[in-house]
Image (tube, grey):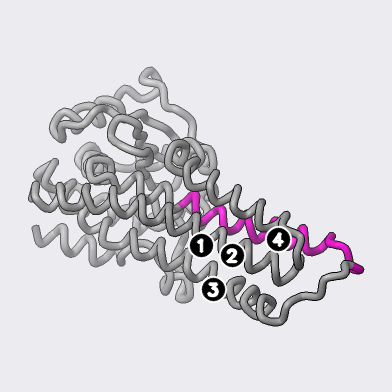
Amino acid sequence: MSGTIYTQVAANKRATVMIVTFFILFISALGFVLGKAFFGDNPIFYIWAVGLSIVSGFGGYYYSDKLVLAANGARELPISESEYAHNLVENLCIGAGLPKPKVYLIDSPAINAFATGRDPNHSAICFTTGIIEKLDKLELEGVIAHELSHIGNYDIRLMAVVGVLVGSITILFDMFFRMNMFRSSNRENKDSPIFLILGIVMLVISPIVATLIKLAISRNREYLADSSGALLTRYPKGLADALTKIAGDENILTTADTATAHLFIANPFKSSAFRSLFDTHPPIEERIKRLNAM
């Protein structure tokens, strides 16, 4: 199993570099094409896109955890407020050989949790109030072990960076539409038909590319974190029972958004037939089945 973990860690480190590089190049190319298509020889949009890609790439690496926690309305959880949760995290960290991450809380009755950060020394685990209150000790240990597996495997770095970079595409589109709305209607340069066609194509495929990248990095990692977490607690039923309660929970985590949904232990949105096609998580029933078979 350790060989699998070491392989996963190395693969995640390589994937992070590759995805950051890809996004910088992709957003720069997107800015160039859209700029040429709709703004002619004025380089302002291209310059803005290149700047955004670089800032998002490096900012996503160093500050993705802070951005993700802030986006979900999380606050640091003092030991005095929940010594119980802190003790569970610390005890499992000792067993996993990991430094204790910071512990955060989202004030929500929904049952969910996630881990974030760039490496085990700069990591955090975030719980909802619902998951602390509604799960028993063995179930919560299963959830914590799952999240610690994401930390130990360096999944947190890859998933948080992708969340920030995908969000930067949304920012780029918003800026594009605002700039295009107020651009001068009597500029001398005519729109190039070729760049216009390319611009429209890239406008259509960019959100699809972002979604496919999130899908590619999330589903298999959930299965690996489930199995790694079960090995840490030596009680797969604990996580299986926790997932059963999460699946049956009717509360919606209102602070979650599509850019960070892939970080949570389970999809924070209630699935619809359409949304399930683009779900970043494997079916929760299949995860429970695999855990019960261990």
CB atoms of marks 4 and 1 within 8 Å: no
Which segment did they paint magenta? 163-186
Query: Disc 2 and disc 1: Cα gap in Å?
Result: 6 Å
Residue 55 vs residue 205, the one in the foreground: 55
Q: Which residue is mark 3?
A: 205
Disc 2 residue type (three-letter): Leu
Instruction: Count neighbours of disc 3 (C-alpha within 10 A) and say few if under 14, some if 14 to 19, many if 20 or more.
Output: few
Task: Residue at 76% x, 67% y: name it.
Answer: 40
Q: In the rendered view, tell whether residue 84 sits above or below residue 277.
A: above
Residue 291, horizontal then vertical, whole percent? 16, 58
- Which label number is shown at residue 30? 2
Q: Which residue is mark 1?
A: 26
Disc 1 residue type (three-letter): Phe
Disc nearer the start of the sequence (3/1): 1
Task: Residue at 30% x, 62% y: name it.
Answer: 219
Instruction: Count neighbours of disc 1 (C-alpha within 10 A) and say few if under 14, some if 14 to 19, many if 20 or more.
Output: some
Residue 288 vs residue 257, the one in the foreground: 257
CB atoms of marks 2 and 1 within 8 Å: yes
Dot 4 falls on a residue whose secondary structure is helix
Instruction: Count neighbours of disc 2 (C-alpha within 10 A) and say few if under 14, some if 14 to 19, many if 20 or more.
Output: many
Task: Residue at 38% x, 65% y: name it.
Answer: 215
Query: Disc 4 and disc 1: Cα gap in Å?
Result: 15 Å
CB atoms of marks 3 and 4 within 8 Å: no
Q: Is residue 177 magenta?
A: yes
> Relative to residue 113, is residue 108 drawn left or right?
right
As drawn, which residue projects farthest toward the top?
80
CB atoms of marks 2 and 3 within 8 Å: no
Q: Which residue is mark 4?
A: 176
